[in-house]
Structures are given as structure tokens and as C-alpha cells.
Image (cartoon, rainbow, N blue to C red):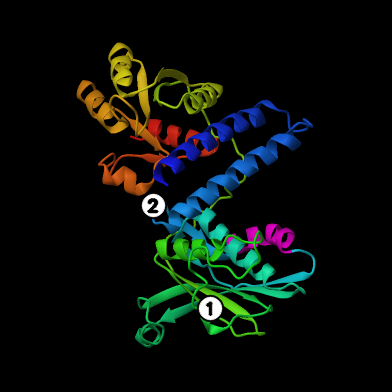
Amino acid sequence: MRGGAHDFNNILSAILGYGSLLMIKMEKDDPLRQYVEPIIASAKGAANLTKSLLTFSRKEIINPSPVDLNEITKKMEKLLLRVIGEDIELKTSLIDKDLIVMADGGQMEQVLMNLCTNARDAMPKGGPLSIDTNIVELDEEFRKTHGYGRTGTYAVISVTDTGTGMDEKTRSRIFEPFFTTKEIGKGTGLGLSIVYGIIKHHNGYINCYSEPEKETTFRIFLPLTKAKNEETDPRAFVPPSGGTETILLAEDDASVRNSTRAMLEEFGYKVIEAADGEEAIRTFADNGDNIRLLLFDLLMPRKNGKEAYEEIEKIRPGVRALFTSGYTADMIYGKDLFEQGLDLVPKPVLSTELLTRVREALDDK
């Protein structure tokens, strides 16, 4: 899974990079945009699926930030309506308070999508589907009753269908990977297991209430935080500011290196390339006076990104660096490829995010 995820993430990085370049080059009214936009959307969807599968196996790096579950729910409504179909009535009832939790906004969207598509499949005759949010206090009594949970204040998001329901035997297995009651070809059995993995990865809890021929409710508990909401729409393409600085780009995958170089140059940066760690060190020694930022893939032949960075820092202490990787978290930390305090951007990365992180690294005082 680790090597496969790395290769797949590199492929997606190149697709997203070149696709974003096409979008930048096109006028807003260019008729070809209707073909480029679905390419980028599909690549994003594949990236989210990979992240979700890795989250379930607890190998994904997540960078949680304060997000509002109410805002995420509102943002997802139109998309959910298209997915669930016209015969299902979507009803939302959101508490009139901020529901700020520390979470990956994209993965919270994935949770809602998976729960609602699962509900749709359980409602062949249509009917109401409800999404509700609330705030609850989990006390010691709750923990004893349900066998899990830490006491404290939690945001709760509930998804309730009016479908066929489940018996206790089925309900006890719904979060198992590849368990499904659907016909062959109509489900992988991964949807609810991915939801379970995401919620556990965010220090939350999920339970399910269901009986045969009665409604089913999935209830998710996530710890509330007092931090300020920083969620932005990851699907909005707003080109960030560029610059004129020189960047040393070290990446052993040629397609990723070429697309990254093209994107950086499109935004004004000067780029010097290296295909491995040793070449990066030699290149810096020859051009160090001009280079303002190292943009290194973590795992490369002939010295990895961390080793190359450490050698270069001997030449210029305090040199600024930004690292990328398509490998899983256990691979990165297990092989001592990374350490706290260094900046890491997991692949695949949207061009907007990469350009923003590059600018932040250059401007960091």
C-alpha cells in the first residue's frame, strides 16, 4: 500500500499540476475549460479517495485546522442533492452556534458524502434524509453506557435515513472493511469503514442506531475547540501571489519535477532542478548565493531530501526548505525521513496550496 500510494500520488500531482497550468492559461470564457475542469475535479476526487483509504489504515498525514461543521454541511448541500437523487428529500437542521472542531475539512466532506450515499442506497423508494447538528456534553455516565468517549463538550452531526434499517447482527459489522449487504457490483464495503477511520483519526466517535424497517441514524461526535475557523473552500481556484526568487527543486520523478517547475516559473520564480539528493547538494554548492528556497522530495535516490538538506545547511546555516512526499506517514516517520519543525506538504498537492506554502516559506522571518 505504501509504495502504491506513493506512485499514485506522484501521478496525481502531475495531473493536477498540468491541469492547473491549463486553467491559468485559458480565458474564463474559453470553451475548452468545460473539459479541463472535470479533469482537475476527477484528480481531486482520486486524491481524496487515496487519503481516505490511508486514513482508515492510519497511514495518512493529516493537517487539521479549525473548521465549522455547520459551514461544511451548508457547502455540501448542493453536491449532496445531486448525488442522492430527486426521489430523496434532503433536510438540514443546524444548531445556531459555531461548531468549530480541529479537522481536515476535505475529510469531513468525505464523511458526509459517504454517509449520505450509504443512506441513499438504503432508501430504494426514496423519502426524507436528514442532517442535524448539535452540541452535547459527554459525561462519565455516557462513557459507561457506550463504552467509549472522553468527557467534555462535543459537536454532534447526525445523518438519519428512512430506509430499510438493519438488524443487530448486520449493524455490529457495518464498520468492517469490505463488509456489504449490497449486490455484487453495487458497493465495495469501504464507505462506512472509511468514515470510521476518519473519525477515529480525528479523536472522535461514531455510533449507529437502527432497527429493521425503521430509520437508521449515524451520529458523529467530535471535540469542540475554541480556535478560530480557518476553513476555506479547497475547490475554489484563486491563484496566489508569486515571486522572483530562485528555488532549488529536487525531485526524482520527472513528470512531477517538470510540472512543478512549470507552475513555479509561471508565477515568476526562477527554478534550478536536481534529480536526486547528491545532485541537489552539488547544484547548491555551485549556485548557493542565488538560491532562496529548497523544495525537496523527501525520498530520493543517492541521498534523501532530509540528508541533502542537512548537508546544504552546513554550507548555509538556516537555509529555508519545504519538503514534499507521496509516501505514507508510517514510512516517513518510521524511516526517520522527517522530524518536527520541518515543513511538509503531502502529495498530491493543489497548485494553489503549493504556491501559497512556497510564498509563506520565503516570507517566513
* Residue 13: x %, y % from top left: 52, 35
Q: Earlier in the sequence, mark 2 or mark 1?
A: 2
* Residue 19: x %, y % from top left: 62, 32
Q: In the depicted view, which residue is nearer to us: 30 or 49? A: 49
Magenta stretch, main secondary structure class: helix
| Spatial separation of the CA atoms under disc 2 and disc 1 | 26 Å
Whether 152 is among the magenta residues is no
* Residue tagged 1: 171
**Could you tell me which residue is drawn at 57 percent across and 58 percent down?**
109
* Residue 291: x %, y % from top left: 36, 19
Q: Secondary structure at mark 2?
A: loop
Give the farthest residue toward the top.
286
The reply to whether residue 348 is in sight is no
* Residue tagged 2: 59
Q: In the image, which residues are magenta?
A: 72-84
Is 13 above or below relative to 280? Answer: below
**Could you tell me which residue is drawn at 35 percent across and 76 percent down?**
150
**Could you tell me which residue is drawn at 59 percent across and 47 percent down?**
45
Q: The C terminus appears in which quarter of the rendering?
A: top left
Q: How many other residues sit within 10 Å of disc 2, few (<14), some (14-19) or many (≥20)?
A: many
Q: Is residue 123 left or right of residue 250?
A: right
**Could you tell me which residue is drawn at 35 percent across and 39 percent down?**
343
Amino acid type shown at disc 1: Arg
Amino acid type shown at disc 2: Lys
Asked where in the image residue 137 lies, by quadrant, the reply is bottom left
